[in-house]
Amino acid sequence: MENTEAPPGVREAEGPGTGSGGSPDERRLLVVVHAAFLLLLGSSFARFLTRDQGGPRTAWVAGLFAVFALLYGLGHLLAPPPRAGTPPGARHLVWLASVSAVWAALLALAPSATWCAMPLLFAGLYALPPRIAVPLAAVLTALVVVSEVRAAEGPLNPNMVVAPIAVAAVATAVFVHLQRQGTRQRALIDDLVRTRRDLAATERRAGVLAERQRLSAEIHDTLAQGLSSQRMLLQAAQRVWPTDPETARAHVREAADVTARSLAEARRFVHDLAPADLAGQSLPAALAALAERESGPGLTVGFHLVGDLHVPLPERTEAALLRIAQGALANVREHAAATRAALTLTCLDEQISLDVADNGRGFDPAPTRPATLASPTARPTAAPGRTRGHGLPAMRIRARQSGGTLTVESAPGEGTVVTAAIPLAPAEAARTGTSYGPTPEPAA
């Protein structure tokens, strides 16, 4: 199951109020807020005892101070603030209303409790949406201003009116800005998680399609080719069995050999190994063996090596060239009506190329459909718009996956030449002593 949880560090940026399981920064912020509340509460109570005590309401005020402190402490234990971006619960709203009501009553009896409004302002701005938190901040600020003016002695100090409003405005603006920024950040995190999930799904689909394409090409070049050869040989044996049993038995033996090779290919295909023909021998030897196998009554296949192959090629390149040769010769045998074919492996300074040429009927290599690639040896009399097979697209894919190209030259009645050219990697060229400079022109 896919993990869509936000990465570490991202969850820590969600804001305060996530409980004891929050980040260290959140815990430090809560410690500072609670310490500030205790300092403000203690200084307010001390000021009341030094300036406002002596009246009949002293006991009530002291009791309200105690209730206020108790409510504040219990609220953070029993009704913690909600996680950032989530609406506050009913328990937290009840606590916020209760502690605000107690503070308002305390303020009416003891103006010394004025600055205890700051923790309430913090709690309201964090827990409530801006459309409710801003009016609450305005009410708290108005109560503070009224309390300051009521308790003022002598001429009115303008700072008693301006300072609470300025502090509340700055605090409200900062909190609203942080809240909106947190909302945008959470939206970006959600988008990042969705994008990561979609990217993983896209990569899985691409991997499935690539594997299907590989399986399709492998089956076409191994099992399908072998079954086609067996069918042709068995049909030939059936036709000549009444008149020439010896020739028919030879066809059956050859079909059995094809079956054995196909079985070996299937086993290696299941285990995702290199082609069986490349086990224990080089690419030129495998191509020579392929040419010898494909030669028979009516078709002669030759192999030529041009240049020297000093070091082994990468397994992927060898497998691609061998499969291309197998696919091209299968098309020659089944469709071209050719009597001769030639495999030519050319080792140049910068690339290795394979040519598969035949003297068959040829065809028009132009595709009949934009999305359909022509087979190099399809019959030229195919109906318009007909798909010409899977052979050439599979060859092109193999060449492209190895960093090379595949070209087809043909014309009706003039045979076909399929050329796969794969560049050598710089490391391979260095080991063979070749360079990537200009190739000298041959002498006239």
Image (cartoon, rainbow, N blue to C red):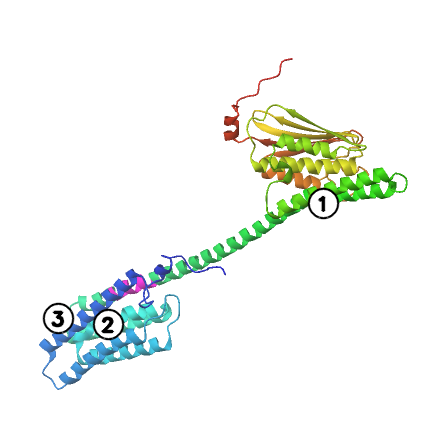
Determine the residue positioned at 37% across, 69% down: 129
Task: Locate the C terminus and report the quarter of the image it occupies.
Answer: top right
Of the residues under marks 3 and 1, which one precedes in the sequence? 3
Mark 3 is on which residue type?
Pro
Q: Quadrant of residue 422?
A: top right
Give the crowd class for mark 2: few <14, some 14-19, many >=20 residues within 10 Å: many
Determine the residue positioned at 65% across, 25% down: 305
Say if the magenta span includes residue 197: no
**Range of magenta residues:** 167-176
Label 2 sits on residue: 117
- In the image, taking residue 176 as reference, residue 44 lies left or right, namely left
Q: Secondary structure at mark 1?
A: helix
Q: CA distance from mark 1 to mark 2?
A: 84 Å
Label 3 sits on residue: 155
Give the crowd class for mark 1: few <14, some 14-19, many >=20 residues within 10 Å: some
Q: Quadrant of residue 396?
A: top right
For residue 206, which numbered disc appears in the image? none
Q: CA distance from mark 3 to mark 2?
A: 25 Å
Magenta stretch: dominant SS?
helix
Where does the image place residue 292, in percent across and percent down from the top left?
72, 32
Where does the image place residue 314, in percent across and percent down from the top left?
55, 35
Q: Quadrant of residue 331?
A: top right
Of the residues under marks 3 and 2, which one precedes in the sequence? 2
Disc 3 + disc 2, Cβ < 8 Å: no
State the count of labels.
Answer: 3
Q: CA distance from mark 3 to mark 1?
A: 104 Å
Mark 1 is on which residue type?
Ala
Mark 2 is on which residue type?
Ala
Q: Secondary structure at mark 2?
A: helix
Say if the magenta span includes residue 175: yes
Label 1 sits on residue: 224
Of circles 3 and 1, which is in front? 1
